Amino acid sequence: MFTTGQLIFAALFVVCFTIVMVVMYRKDLALHKMYYRGNYKILLGFFAFIAILFLFKFYMKH
């Protein structure tokens, strides 16, 4: 299905991409702590909204 070269490229790409993402996240960690304080509240609100939609869907189905 894939050639050996394509598989090697994909593996190297995934490894390099992951390393770069970790390095960049650690570099920006101080900014994240300063500007994105309290973002867990928004995430909880989003999950609550999705849960309410599912409950409403199941309620209307029965």
Image (spheres, helix red, strand yellow):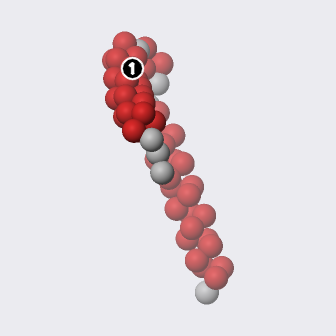
Q: Position of residue 42 (x, y in %)?
A: 51, 40
Front residue (pair 7, 60): 7
Q: Position of residue 32 (x, y in %)?
A: 42, 20
Q: Quadrant of residue 57?
A: bottom right
- Residue drawn 34% across and 17% down? 23
Q: Amino acid at mark 1?
A: Val
Total labels drawn? 1
Left or right: 32 with respect to 62?
A: left
Crowding at dot 1, Cα within 10 Å, few <14 / some 14-19 / many 20+, comes out as few
The residue under label 1 is 20
Front residue (pair 51, 12): 12
Can you say whether 32 is above or below 51 in the image? above
Can you say whether 3 is above or below 27 in the image? below
Q: Quadrant of the C terminus?
A: bottom right
Q: Is residue 18 visible?
A: no
Q: Residue furthest right?
A: 60
- Residue drawn 39% across and 38% down? 4
- Residue drawn 46% across and 24% down? 36
Can you say whether 62 is above or below 6 in the image? below
- Residue drawn 37% across and 24% down? 16
